[in-house]
């Protein structure tokens, strides 16, 4: 039997029953009189038409987002009826604001199983409705759809205006708190005095180098730092910790839809610390030895990788009792299954003292020749660095002039405030980037001079330096001399950076002079 014949009896009968459908889009609308007003008008309408009211569906549901579960619950109830049923609503946009439900509703109408009554518009649809009534239905939906589109456009314009003004329009990042708007004060974001110090601790620990994201995540959990966003409070994950460490909100900027905005909220992370964390995370360089955050320091931080899986070895301290403790290196085994066991730091130092403490006799003449040769090799690089610094200085001056011209144009009305703020932010960010590059080149110059002055003394006294009680001195010497350090059982395998490899292997200076590298900077600058 075809569907047409199946529902023929229902289609031919007179409609005597109805369901009432009243809808609002949000809880705020529900608190008003909207639902009650809709129910009152449609109940009176049903009474006037002598409809038996089967059920009332009063729902809070958007008609443009989600699957409209309540709407389809009402529709299934109507389909289950054995008699023709009227769906009575206050107006078209209370039933729908788009065309996606039209297909199913129109199929039921054409089968004669339902009627759709619109109180406000003063018409209803049934199996034999003419094209004029169908058009009125379509126009009602189109009008509701245009209203939704205009509302969306207004919201987007408002959001963009607030972003241009530096206003963050969502849950504040971990370490901050959202302050709700009141009658006398606007909404704001303030530092969370409880969690901000914990977030800063994560940056400081990661800036040391040699710490994995899992190490920092474990620390965050130990500190009791949660991923509290608005009213949600859950255990923090590794991905969330990574997002925290990469979030520019902590240094005054946020990015939305690929565009960077500057915000006015208070900061508790230094830009220098943030940049060290980014450099460490991206592997461009290790943090400079003179910059440390926190109290605990280790000799091999960020220097040794696991020979089994390639992960950085983490330095930790094992405390036996109040008087006995020792440092060791361990692999976190994050990349793959790894069989590397922890290695005692003291045993690695003994190995290095034995292998690097070779007898070297460097005369004054040899030292003079060494420095002369190193100066020749560095000359070309110094010229290149000077050219780069000159180019940066010229670009900074050009940006200053560009900022002045932009301000003059703004004062003369050649650009509006939105364009002015946008271009000004771009100029400021470009200047910050160039200034960081300049500072990096100045730092390289200082370290190059230091290397040149101490190159022979360092090579001749490696063993002495390794016995020094100053941890930072040991670490700096090892970073300067060693590269490609990997575990090999309970020992480590390593390479020696030129020209130290030749000095530590043989006193024959004629060999290393022909083979040394021109770049004598520490590996974290490469």
Image (tube, rainbow, N blue to C red):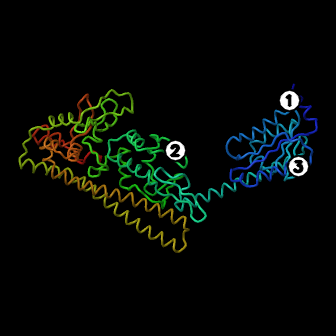
Tag 1 near tag 3, CB within 8 Å: no
- In three-dimensional space, the C-alpha distance between marks 2 and 1, rounded to whole angstroms, equals 53 Å
Residue position marked by numbered label 1 in the rendering: 3
Whichever of labels 2 and 1 marks the residue nearer the N terminus, that label is 1
Q: Is residue 381 above or below residue 398?
A: above
Label 2: element kind? loop
- Residue 168: percent from left, percent from top: 53, 56
Q: Is residue 58 above or below residue 5?
A: below
Residue at horizontal 41 percent and vertical 43 percent from the top? 220
Tag 2 near tag 1, CB within 8 Å: no
Residue reaching furthest to the front? 322
Whichever of labels 1 and 3 marks the residue nearer the N terminus, that label is 1
Numbered tag placed on residue 45 in the rendering: 3
- Quadrant for the N terminus in the image: top right
Q: Nearer the viewer, mark 1 or mark 3?
A: 3
Tag 2 near tag 3, CB within 8 Å: no
Q: Nearer the viewer, mark 2 or mark 3?
A: 2
* Image position of 370 (left or right of 111): left
Q: Could you classify mark 3 by the number of other residues whose Cα lies within 10 Å: few (under 14), some (14-19), or many (20 or more)?
A: some
Label 1: element kind? helix
- Residue 40: percent from left, percent from top: 83, 51
- Residue 499: percent from left, percent from top: 18, 43
């Amino acid at each position: 039997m075809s569907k047409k014949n199946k529902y023929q009896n229902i289609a031919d009968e007179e409609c005597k029953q109805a369901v009432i459908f009243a809808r609002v889009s949000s809880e705020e609308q529900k608190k008003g009189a909207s639902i009650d007003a809709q129910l009152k008008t449609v109940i009176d309408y049903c009474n006037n038409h002598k409809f038996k009211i089967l059920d009332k569906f009063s729902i809070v549901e958007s008609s443009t987002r989600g699957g409209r579960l309540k709407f389809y619950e009402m529709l299934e109830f109507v389909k289950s009826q054995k008699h023709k049923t009227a769906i009575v609503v206050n107006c078209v946009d209370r039933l729908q604001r788009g065309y996606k439900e039209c297909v199913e509703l129109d199929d039921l109408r054409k089968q004669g199983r339902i009627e759709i009554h619109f109180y406000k518009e003063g018409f209803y649809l049934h199996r034999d409705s003419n094209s004029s009534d169908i058009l009125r239905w379509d126009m009602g939906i189109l009008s509701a759809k245009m209203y939704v589109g205009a509302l969306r456009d207004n919201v987007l314009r408002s959001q963009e205006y607030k972003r241009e003004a530096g206003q963050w329009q969502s849950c504040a990042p971990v370490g901050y708190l959202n302050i709700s708007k009141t009658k006398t004060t606007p909404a704001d974001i303030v530092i969370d005095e409880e969690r901000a110090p914990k977030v800063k601790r994560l940056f400081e620990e990661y800036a040391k180098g040699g710490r994995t994201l899992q190490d920092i995540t474990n620390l965050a959990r130990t500190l009791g730092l949660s991923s509290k966003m608005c009213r949600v409070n859950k255990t923090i994950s590794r991905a969330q910790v990574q997002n925290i460490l990469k979030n520019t909100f902590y240094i005054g900027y946020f990015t939305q839809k690929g565009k960077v905005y500057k915000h006015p909220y208070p900061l508790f992370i230094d830009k220098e610390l943030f940049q060290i964390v980014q450099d460490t995370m991206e592997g461009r360089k290790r943090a400079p030895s003179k910059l440390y955050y926190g109290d605990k320091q280790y000799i091999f931080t960020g220097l040794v990788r696991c020979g089994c899986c390639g992960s950085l070895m983490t330095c930790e301290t094992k405390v036996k009792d109040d008087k006995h403790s020792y440092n060791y290196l361990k692999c976190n085994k994050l990349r793959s299954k790894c069989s590397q066991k922890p290695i005692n730091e003291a045993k690695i130092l003994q190995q290095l003292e034995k292998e690097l403490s070779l007898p070297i006799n460097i005369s004054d003449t040899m030292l003079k020749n060494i420095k002369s040769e190193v100066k020749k090799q560095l000359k070309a690089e110094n010229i290149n660095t000077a050219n780069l610094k000159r180019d940066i200085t010229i670009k900074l001056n050009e940006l200053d002039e560009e900022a002045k011209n932009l301000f003059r144009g703004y004062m003369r009305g050649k650009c509006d405030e939105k364009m002015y703020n946008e271009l000004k932010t771009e100029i400021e960010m470009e200047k910050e980037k160039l200034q960081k590059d300049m500072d990096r080149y100045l730092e390289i110059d200082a370290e190059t001079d230091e290397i040149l002055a101490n190159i022979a003394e360092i090579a001749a006294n490696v063993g002495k330096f390794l016995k020094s009680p100053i941890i930072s001195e040991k670490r700096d010497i090892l970073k300067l001399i060693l590269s490609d350090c990997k575990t090999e059982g309970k020992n480590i395998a390593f390479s020696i950076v030129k020209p130290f490899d030749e000095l530590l292997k043989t006193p024959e200076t004629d060999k290393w002079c022909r083979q040394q590298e021109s770049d004598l900077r520490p590996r974290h600058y490469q």
